[in-house]
């Protein structure tokens, strides 16, 4: 498995890394394929995040990349707005671009930003994870299923938790996770195994319990993404991620072209 399907560049508001530098790193690592997935965030200022991806400039930079022996796909990470009407408007802006792959993610929960420590005050780790997954499942239903490819970082609710040992367990929110997984599976989509959590936790590789449940409910494939914003993080611990997927009974990962998945055995 030599494909990274969650990579950011300086077209995202939280990365300063040129797109060519990320591609060079992918080539040096011997990746077969990379998908750039820069942020498109249209929450209102009241909901604390607004970033209008410059799609024409992004597409131009993509078209000018040299051939370094790595297949390049053009994608985006779509931050689902908290506001339902704004979500519909955002969908139409991004849909017209003709991406190969779109990650549907939630970065704001009911106007609160899990990036900041205040989000966790007065909430246990389990409460935070339940709150996040419930919101993600609700927001996801605002998107036309054909609009997105995969659901990003299901365990985002613990990524920035000040408790450095915080992880998501299936037992924290079993009903919410089942609801999310069933919706994803019934609509022919998948979830992402996002290895950015591994950078926080060191040796521990979380997620076997909820990935196993995803498989039990009928989830047959995933995508793998490093969520890299800087060069050293591309394809971070992908061998561990692949081993985790296999341990959960997941046999395939997907790559995309023109929003159409191709399956590859792990």
Image (cartoon, helix red, strand yellow):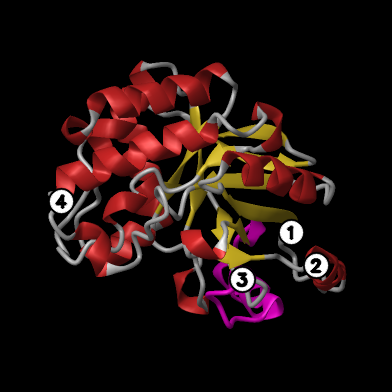
Q: Nearer the viewer, mark 2 or mark 4?
A: 4
Q: CA distance from mark 1 to mark 3?
A: 18 Å
Residue 266 visible from this viewpoint: no
Could you tell me which residue is drawn at 46 percent across and 76 percent down? 232
* Displayed quadrant of residue 43: bottom right
Labels 1 & 2 near each other (Cβ < 8 A):
yes
Magenta segment includes 56: no
Between the C-alphas of marks 3 and 2, the distance is 14 Å
82 left or right, relative to 154: right
Pointer 1 local density, CA inside 10 Å: few below 14, some 14–19, many at least 20: many
Quadrant location of residue 25? bottom right
Nearer mark to the viewer, of 1 and 4: 4
Choose the circle earlier in sequence order: 2 or 4: 2
At 24% from the left and 66% from the top, the residue drawn is 118
Q: Disc 1 versus disc 4: distance between alpha carbons?
A: 41 Å
**Contact, CB < 8 Å: mark 1 with mark 3?**
no
Q: Which residue is mark 1?
A: 72
Mark with earlier residue (1, 3): 3
Toward the viewer: 74 or 120? 120
- Give residue 12's mark: 3
Q: Position of residue 177 (x, y in %)?
A: 33, 29
- Residue 250, given in percent of the width and then of the height, sits at 41, 29
> The residue tagged with tag 1: helix, strand or loop?
strand
Front one among 186 and 124: 124
């Amino acid at each position: 498995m030599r494909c990274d399907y969650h990579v950011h560049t300086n077209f995202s508001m939280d990365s300063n890394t040129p797109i060519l530098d990320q591609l060079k790193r992918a080539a040096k690592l011997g990746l077969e394929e990379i998908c750039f997935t820069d942020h498109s965030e249209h929450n209102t200022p009241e909901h604390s995040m607004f970033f209008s991806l410059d799609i024409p400039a992004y597409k131009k930079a993509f078209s000018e990349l040299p051939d370094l022996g790595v297949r390049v796909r053009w994608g985006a990470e779509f931050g689902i707005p908290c506001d339902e009407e704004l979500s519909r408007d955002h969908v139409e802006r991004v849909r017209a671009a003709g991406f190969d792959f779109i990650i549907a993610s939630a970065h704001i929960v009911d106007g609160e930003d899990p990036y900041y420590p205040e989000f966790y005050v007065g909430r246990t780790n389990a409460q935070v994870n339940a709150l996040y997954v419930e919101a993600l499942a609700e927001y996801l239903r605002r998107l036309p299923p054909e609009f997105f490819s995969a659901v990003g970082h299901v365990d985002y609710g613990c990524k920035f938790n000040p408790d450095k040992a915080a992880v998501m367990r299936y037992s924290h929110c079993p009903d919410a996770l089942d609801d999310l997984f069933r919706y994803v599976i019934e609509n022919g989509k998948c979830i992402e195994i996002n290895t950015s959590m591994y950078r926080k936790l060191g040796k521990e590789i979380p997620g076997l319990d909820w990935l196993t449940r995803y498989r039990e409910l009928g989830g047959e494939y995933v995508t793998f993404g490093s969520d890299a914003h800087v060069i050293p993080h591309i394809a971070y611990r992908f061998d561990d991620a692949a081993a985790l997927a296999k341990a959960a009974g997941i046999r395939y990962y997907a790559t995309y072209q023109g929003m159409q998945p191709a399956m590859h055995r792990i």
